[in-house]
Image (cartoon, helix red, strand yellow):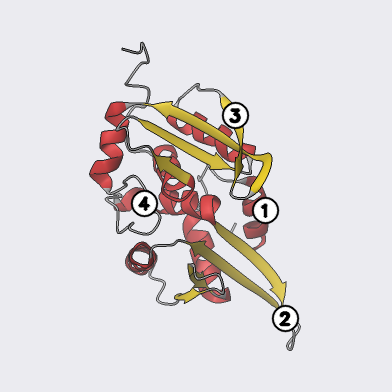
């Protein structure tokens, strides 16, 4: 039997812990062995922040993805049976991409979880409308599982009082939850509250002009 320590992650809800769960929900993967998890991202900052949030020390490696042979993605893999079981208990599962549904995330930490999801597989985008020439803001979350996006939308409505947003299917067939300008501003202020600490800097910099001081 391996000498690998099985209790690496302290399972206590906090803003940092919820943010890490958001990253795992979008960019993470649970092995079918009941022990190992990994997180993959093009942003090394994501992996570094994830390690800090969970207090793990595992080595970061690089890997290829899809048809591209170049190792352009950063990856951290670690084993922890207790944490794996916890992830199952809140609704995550192996091969989750198309079967993910609502998760058991405490309301108090949902905005941190959501920020992790957006950093993992979402975007914050400002562009100029081709006709009005006015700046337009969009906040998006991508997921191959419509039930998960519907759950996120419902939680945002209940906790942030944002009634807008819609789910659309892009040309590649992947559903996307979208918030337009006024609702997007409300959503960004909900996620990036004054004491929020864990976030991907390049996305925060796009959001920052829309945040209330």
Q: Which of the two labelled residues, at mark 4 and mark 2, occupies the earlier sequence position?
A: 4
Which residue is under mark 4? 96
**Gap in Å between the C-alphas at discs 4 and 3?**
23 Å
Residue at disc 1, secondary structure: helix
Could you classify mark 3 by the number of other residues whose Cα lies within 10 Å: few (under 14), some (14-19), or many (20 or more)? few
Give percent across and percent down for residue 129: 71, 81
Nearer to us: label 3 or label 1: 3
Cα separation, mark 1 vs mark 2, equals 20 Å
Q: Secondary structure at mark 4?
A: loop
The dot on residue 61 is 3
Q: Which quarter of the image is occupied by the C terminus?
A: bottom right
Quadrant in the rendering for residue 8: top left
Where is 113 relative to 155, above or below?
A: above
The 10 Å Cα crowd at callout 1, few under 14, some 14 to 19, many 20 or more, is few
**Residue 211 in view, yes or no:** no
Task: Give residue 10's position: percent from left, percent from top.
Answer: 34, 27
Q: Which residue is mark 2?
A: 134
Q: Secondary structure at mark 3?
A: strand
Query: Residue shown at 36%/69% (left/top)?
Result: 157
Q: Is residue 182 above or below residue 100?
A: below
């Amino acid at each position: 039997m391996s000498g690998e320590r099985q209790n690496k992650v302290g399972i206590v809800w906090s803003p940092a812990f919820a943010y890490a769960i958001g990253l795992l929900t979008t960019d993470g993967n649970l092995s079918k062995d009941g022990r190992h998890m990994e997180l993959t991202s093009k942003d090394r900052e994501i992996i570094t922040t994830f390690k800090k949030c969970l207090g793990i020390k595992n080595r970061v490696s690089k890997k290829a993805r899809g048809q591209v042979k170049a190792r352009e993605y950063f990856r951290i893999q670690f084993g922890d049976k207790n944490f794996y079981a916890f992830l199952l208990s809140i609704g995550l599962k192996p091969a989750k991409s198309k079967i993910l549904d609502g998760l058991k995330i405490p309301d108090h930490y949902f905005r941190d979880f959501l920020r992790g999801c957006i950093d993992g597989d979402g975007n914050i985008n400002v562009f100029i409308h081709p006709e009005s020439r006015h700046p337009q803001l969009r906040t998006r979350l991508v997921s191959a599982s419509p039930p998960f996006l519907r759950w996120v939308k419902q939680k945002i409505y209940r906790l942030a009082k944002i009634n807008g947003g819609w789910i659309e299917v892009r040309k590649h067939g992947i559903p996307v939850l979208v918030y337009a300008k006024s609702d997007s501003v409300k959503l960004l202020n909900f996620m990036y509250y004054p004491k929020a600490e864990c976030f991907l800097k390049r996305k925060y910099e796009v959001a920052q002009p829309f945040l209330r001081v």
